Image (cartoon, rainbow, N blue to C red):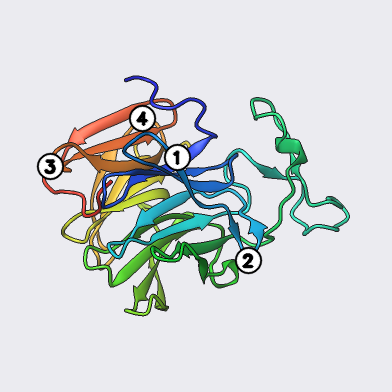
Amino acid sequence: VSVFRAPSNNSNGNTFDFQGRQVTCEHTGRRIARYEHDGSITSIAEAYMGQRLNSPNDIAPHRDGSYWFTDPAAGFTLYEGAPEVSGGAGNADGRYNSRAGQPIGVGSAKREIMTANVYRVDPQSGRVDMMMSQSNLPGNPNGIAFAPDYKKVYIVTAGIVQSFDLGADNKLSNQKEFSNFMIDGIRCGTDGIRVDVNGNLWCGSNAGRNLGYSGVTVWSSAGKLLGRIRLPETCANLAFGGPKRNRLFMTAAQSLYAVYVNTQGASPG
């Protein structure tokens, strides 16, 4: 294991697109960045309707060349001073509060979009469109992934997964709760997700202090629990890798785990 990029601007939700380029969500950069084959960096999205993004969290490339990403209110490294919108009693200026270990200047950054939404970056124009507003979700959007046929999209919010039908016009419909992620009466909250070639969902699991329930849960496209990978730590994100995309990498609280599985990831990364 070696350092790939430093500083990373508190990157999260790393993936690869269909051209083999790494795409990442920069928390402190408040943008989506793409790393080209020649080593240069392209800023894919920084704002919506002229307002700076909050803190992009996770991203999924579509086979049409677009990028879909979630932009929760504060991510994990930018913290809103109070839940009120700008002008509220507890946060008159709507600014982020600086915390130890954050880059200089974070404390002067002002939140401009007061909702946490899901966006799409058009592959031709580069236009950023809102695909789902926080008002239609039970909580902040987090992980995101497509079904292998790209007729469904899965969005993690409030530790559960919402599924949507995805039309040819990129409109979302038929919103459903995919699962409540309760196992043996214990909530195994989900963060990052991936889909395999069979349409099964692989979900990072955070069961808190309930020993034996954190790790990865695997669900059929119908929402049936198929299996679990138990880890001694909570698992935030995961990805299929290797030449055959059959090795599952799991980022846990303090460790990186990997295991070969009898399937392949459906997306490039």
Q: Is residue 196 left or right of residue 211?
A: left
Q: Mark 1 or mark 4, which has the lower sequence index?
A: 1
Dot 2, how many residues are within 10 Å of its Cα: few (below 14), some (14-19), or many (20+)?
few
Residue at 35% x, 19% y is 2
Q: Is residue 38 above or below residue 164?
A: above
Looking at the picture, how far across and down is residue 155, in whole percent?
42, 61
Give the label, 3 or 4, closer to the camera.
3
Q: Which residue is mark 3?
A: 244
Q: Is residue 71 above or below residue 49?
A: above
Residue at 53% x, 35% y is 10
The amino acid on which the numbered mark 4 sits, given as a three-letter code, is Pro
Q: Mark 3 or mark 1, which has the lower sequence index?
A: 1
Residue at 74% x, 48% y is 110
The amino acid on which the numbered mark 1 sits, given as a three-letter code, is Ile
Q: Which residue is mark 1?
A: 41
Q: Which residue is mark 4?
A: 232
Find numbered disc 2 in the image and state the secondary structure of the residue it sits on. loop
Q: Mark 3 or mark 4, which has the lower sequence index?
A: 4
